[in-house]
Amino acid sequence: MTAAENVCYTLINVPMDSEPPSEISLKNDLGNCDMSAFLTSFPLLEKGDVKLKTEALKKVIIMILNGEKLPGLLMTIIRFVLPLQDHTIKKLLLVFWEIVPKTTPDGRLLQEMILVCDAYRKDLQHPNEFIRGSTLRFLCKLKEAELLEPLMPAIRACLEHRHSYVRRNAVLAIYTIYRNFEHLIPDAPELIHDFLVNEKDASCKRNAFMMLIHADQDRALDYLSTCIDQVQTFGDILQLVIVELIYKVCHANPSERARFIRCIYNLLQSSSPAVKYEAAGTLVTLSSAPTAIKAAAQCYIDLIIKESDNNVKLIVLDRLIELKEHPSHERVLQDLVMDILRVLSTPDLEVRKKTLQLALDLVSSRNVEELVIVLKKEVIKTNNVTEHEDTDKYRQLLVRTLHSCSVRFPDMAANVIPVLMEFLSDNNEAAAADVLEFVREAIQRFDNLRPLIVEKMLEVFHSIKSVKIYRGALWILGEYCSTKEDIQSVMTEVRRSLGEIPIVESEIKKEAGELKPEEEVSVGPSQKLVTEMGTYATQSALSSSRPAKKEEDRPPLRGFLLDGDFFVAASLATTLTKIALRYMSLVQEKKKQNSFNAEAMLLMATILHLGRSSLPKKPITDDDVDRISLCLKVLSECSPLMNDIFNKECRQSLSHMLSAKLEEEKLSQKKESEKRNVTIQPDDPISFMQLTAKNEMSSKEDQFQLSLLAAMGNTQRKEAADPLASKLNKVVTQLTGFSDPVYAEAYVHVNQYDIVLDVLVVNQTSDTLQNCTLELATLGDLKLVEKPSPLTLAPHDFANIKANVKVASTENGIIFGNVVYDVSGAASDRNCVVLSDIHIDIMDYIQPASCTDAEFRQMWAEFEWENKVTVNTNIIDLNEYLQHILKSTNMKCLTPEKALSGYCGFMAANLYARSIFGEDALANVSIEKPIHLGPEAPVTGHIRIRAKSQGMALSLGDKINLSQKKTSL
């Protein structure tokens, strides 16, 4: 069913606590309680209470919708309600005539309907445009040709009415009558074409044009040809229909493209964002020429920048990303990278993230320089703006993008590094950590940049505020300072950062010595007191005060150590050992060697002394003591083996790690490009557009129909093109037993953020069940949107009830409830049938996702809910078990394939997934193969799950427990 064929629905609200009225009381309210009284006093009817009749008519409509048959009321309504001129009554009557049975059991039209038909002929000639228009809308829903035939002249006459509301509804009425009963108005296309030519109102033209599209496409094309140059001046609702027509025509007959493509180009300049969006989408499907792709992409970019709604921005960005996926379009989009970067002016982080990723995918050697300049400006801007929740995250995104650019285009690294290194002293540790990771990779890969990086690192070293960043900076300086001057500069910076040494003695002196010179003696104000004997005495107090020493005055490294963070001391010891060994190889003079060596050892010894004292907030750990002691021993012995380990092996380890990381990135990029490249096999048939039959062309997917289905939540997968296939593939959940008086079963349709229950209810008794109601309740983060309306079920009748449930978060939910009903004529209380529980699977909301190791570790430390699952499986291979868990939980393995390859009897892997609600789920798999139990022994171990919410951690654990064992086919 197309958009034009869809009719509007009328929603009727029913108070749940209202009692169902009887037919006699309704007749009383409608004015027919005492027929003799009415026959003798007819003027009393004309002065009847309209309000009472309105309420009674509403009750009649609700009862008929619930399945009640009220044949005795038909003539009552025709005689006493139909002649009324009240607008509310007339609106309600339209609903009543739509739902009331109009035929006898043998299919013939009721005689009374002739009177109704005459009333509506009068309404079609009524002077009030609202009554005419609403009557025409009602006629669109009539399916009885005998009722419509006498009204045709009046409907035709409405096309010439002065008011546009009447004319546009007349067009719709003519279209539906022509579609259902063509013999009643065979000249409808010609009539509407003539109407369209002379019509001025935009909504009327739109309805008329839409009818011609579906009823007589050739006439629609003829009209469009006559006014194709004026399309830009039309209203947006008509322009949208024109875009739809052009798409359908060119889709069915590609030879028509040249005729209409200019019109689509013109519509890209429309003032309506909706028209521009549809025109750009149509242009891309009709033409793959570079000029067309560029025009459509430019239109999308303008829409993103000008639209204020972030959801619209994200939707249009997705269309740009889809364009990029096509290999032939990618080069065209590369020329628009600078335009795409204009989207970064949007404050929303998700939009910026997608934009940066798109720009990074499109960057090439031709535009990388301009891209880097823009990103550098954006980085500097984030430093100047007032701190916002997303500013730090945005800065991280920019740093990572610049990092990727520099790795892919090494020439850019020299421009980027000086700007980024300023952020090492940033308060945001995450952004500074990204910068440090980038600097570490750059200094290892680009030998020519090492002097520049070391120089900048020494400049910002003293201003670093985070201990984690300080450790990383120490490691880089210790590893890559290769000249005598640089080594001495590092030692100077370390001494400056430590302050006066020995630390313990200087701190004790400071504590003891600061009291005397800085002590201030003050005399408090005098106060008169009365003694026990009644005499007066004066009291004053001497107080001494010492100004508190601000902790900010301490040098950074000294502050870290006094706070008890001695891990940085272990890093410092390693750095001092490296530069001391390197200094001894560079300087031949023995005295200078010993002097430098002794200074390094003194610094380590004073830190050890501090760690063992009571001055730090936390004492030094045994591991840190061992590390510093080892470094002291290495410096005292200076063996060649230790020199090689400290100065060569460390750097080789980093080199291997970076090489493996680069190789993995290249492999993933290669897989991505293979997916995108359309490979054609030698024996694939070649299709020529000119030789394609029309029926084959029409079998291709219609983008307008697909977008309509997507909006309605009915997206059909390619493998299930048959609408019934998706329903038949789903498991039916049986809710009651076969012997229960009411049998119920349900299909559970899981959409993105809601669940639709399609419940079939069958009356298995010989009684009429009244007020049959499906009562549902939920457990977990599920919420019932609306209560299903009550039904009336005839003996052995059935009905479908739909219920919507909103999902708020990712955790296993349960829907439970019952069916309650009254038996017609029984005096007993309401009957109840309890339904089986419906369990909602968490896997419908979890999707694989990726994150960096640093983000994983940070989330692992932050998340407070942990669920430890013991491995209990029949799988005997470690890798097979890991793949089985990944498939069962929709999680992604973050551990590289190289780390998992080979066989050593045990395996550890990190898994990550994100729900559609933005909730993160982490898992650590630690498994082993117990070799002592034989080759057929199953895998053992644990899986630790961490999540922010308890429900997520428990639900994921339950899922793993249920699916651990592999079922044999």
Image (cartoon, rainbow, N blue to C red):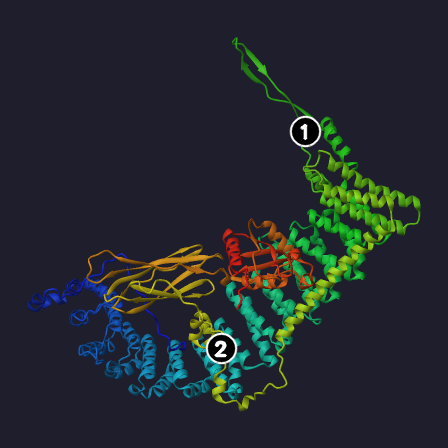
Residue at 32%, 88% in the rendered image: 186
Residue at 33%, 74% in the rendered image: 165
Task: Give percent across and percent down for residue 159.
Answer: 31, 81
Of residues 615 and 141, the one nearer the viewer is: 615
Rendered image quadrant of residue 127: bottom left
Residue at which label 1 appears: 546
**Crowdedness of circle 2 by 10 Å Cα count: few (<14), some, many (20+)?**
some
Of residues 682 and 291, the one nearer the viewer is: 682
**From this viewpoint, is residue 860 visible?**
yes
* Residue 657 against residue 110 in the figure, above or below: above
**From this viewpoint, is residue 272 visible?**
no
**Crowdedness of circle 1 by 10 Å Cα count: few (<14), some, many (20+)?**
few
Rendered image quadrant of residue 518: top right
Task: Give percent across and percent down for residue 158.
Answer: 29, 80
- SS class of the residue under badge 2? helix
- Sequence-wise, the earlier of marks 1 and 2 is 1
Task: Give percent across and percent down for residue 828.
Answer: 21, 56
- Taking the view exactly as shown, the residue that stands out farthest to the right is 589
Of residues 886 and 258, the one nearer the viewer is: 886
- Taking the view exactly as shown, the residue that stands out farthest to the bottom is 691
Residue at which label 2 appears: 703
Of residues 897 and 535, the one nearer the viewer is: 897
- Between the residue at mark 1 and the residue at mark 2, the CA separation in whole angstroms equals 79 Å
Residue 305: image tag: none
Name the residue type under label 1: Arg
Instruction: Decide if residue 923 is on the left or right side of residue 7.
Output: right
Q: Are marks 1 and 2 in contact (CB under 8 Å)?
A: no
Give the foreground label among 1 and 2.
2
Quadrant of the snapshot with the N terminus: bottom left
* Residue 830 against residue 364 in the figure, above or below: above
- SS class of the residue under badge 1? loop
Name the residue type under label 2: Gln
